[in-house]
Each structure stands twice: as C-alpha cells, then as structure tokens.
Amino acid sequence: MGKIQSVASQPKQTRQLSKSASRQHLELLYHVTKEDSVLGSVERSTAHRDQLLHRSGMIFLARSDGRILLQHRSPSKTIFPDCWDSSSSFHVNFGESYGQAARRELKEETGLSARLTYLGKFSYHIPPENEIVAVFSCKSDDPIKIDPTESSGASFQTRDEVNAIASSEKSAPWLTRGWKILTDSRI
C-alpha cells in the first residue's frame, strides 16, 4: 500500500504547483449591479453563499420540427436537483461575454456548435441564486450528446409539453421566465 503524503511533507515546489492548480479550479463569475454593470469578480461559491447578483444564461435548442430540448438536472446537483431545465444553462465566467459562455456551454452540455440568437435578459432571486439570465435560442437537427454530470436525461418536447413542464413544480425556477422570453420572440 502506498504512503499518503501530506501537503506539508511535500517539497516546496510541489506545494506551489498544488496551490496553483487549485486556483485554476476556482470559478470566477461577474459580480454585477441590477443594471448588469460589472462591480468585479466573485468566486461562484461566495456568490451563492452571499446571494450576490451574478451573470448566467440559458439556451433553448429547437429541432426543425419545432420540438425543444429540455434537460433533466442530475439528482446530484446541489442547486435545484432533479428538476427540468432548458437545453443548456450556465454561469458566465469572469472574462467571458454572455455569447462566449453560451457557445462554450452548448458544446459542453450537448456536444453541439450552432448559431445562437440572443433573445433578452431577466433577473431573479430565489436562494441561493441571484442572477441576471441571458436567454438564447438555436436550431439544429444534429445528434446531441448529453453530459451525464450535468443531466440525468434529456428529451425533445412539443411547445405544449414545455408549457406544462415550465409551469410545474418539477422545473428549475428560471425555466418559466426563460420560456416566456422564447415564446414571446416567436422563433
């Protein structure tokens, strides 16, 4: 059996690399005003713990037949587990635009790259979240690949089915507001 080495017993150079590596895993978000002006950066866990207003977004992916992809959030998620969500939802990392974050997350969560259309923004505060949410849509008939760490499943739904899901207690709280922006835009 191998010996477990504590950080204190590691050489100084290794300790510095460990500190550097852990800094790379910090997820810095934009801390913003209600007008979406940037106040600075904030670590994700701090933003949630202190309910600081920060940037996020969501994407609705539509097929040519009009069906919309919804994901079912993993039961292991710490925030709103086991709820229906948009095709992809995300935080905007500090240094990214809303559009850059949307493209990154669409690729990570569905395996797709598609032209995104910005539809609008809304804000909401339901602890621990306090967010300004940018809403995007896209169209693609390409095969999707769902990230199992983010989602326990996904399916394409008709607009009537999404209306029922979005108004149910089994949906993430931001889904209803984002869905309204999408349906008002008439994509």
Image (cartoon, rainbow, N blue to C red):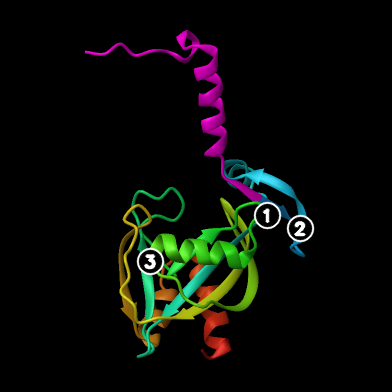
Q: Secondary structure at mark 2?
A: loop
Going from N to C along the chain, the mark reached first, 1 or 2, is: 2
Q: Which image quarter holds the N terminus? A: top left
In terms of depth relative to the viewer, which is nearer, 94 or 87?
94
Residue 164 is situated, as x and y percent measured from the top left of the image, at 39, 80
- 3D distance between C-alphas at marks 3 and 1: 27 Å
Is residue 157 shown above or below 29?
below
Q: Amino acid at mark 3?
A: Thr
Count how many numbered circles sit on residues in the image: 3
Q: Which mark is residue 33?
A: 2
The residue labelled by disc 3 is: 110
Q: Which mark is residue 53?
A: 1
Is residue 167 shown above or below 126?
below
Q: Are marks 3 and 2 in contact (CB under 8 Å)?
A: no
Going from N to C along the chain, the mark reached first, 3 or 2, is: 2
Q: Are marks 3 and 1 in contact (CB under 8 Å)?
A: no
Label 1: few (<14), some or many (≥20) within 10 Å? Answer: many
Residue drawn at (26%, 13%) of the image: 2
Is residue 184 shown above or below 33?
below
Query: In screen coordinates, is 68 left or right of 16?
Result: left
Q: Is residue 12 magenta?
A: yes
Q: Are marks 1 and 2 in contact (CB under 8 Å)?
A: yes
Residue drawn at (60%, 53%) of the image: 93
User: Start and end of the magenta stretch?
Assistant: 1-29
Q: Is residue 20 magenta?
A: yes
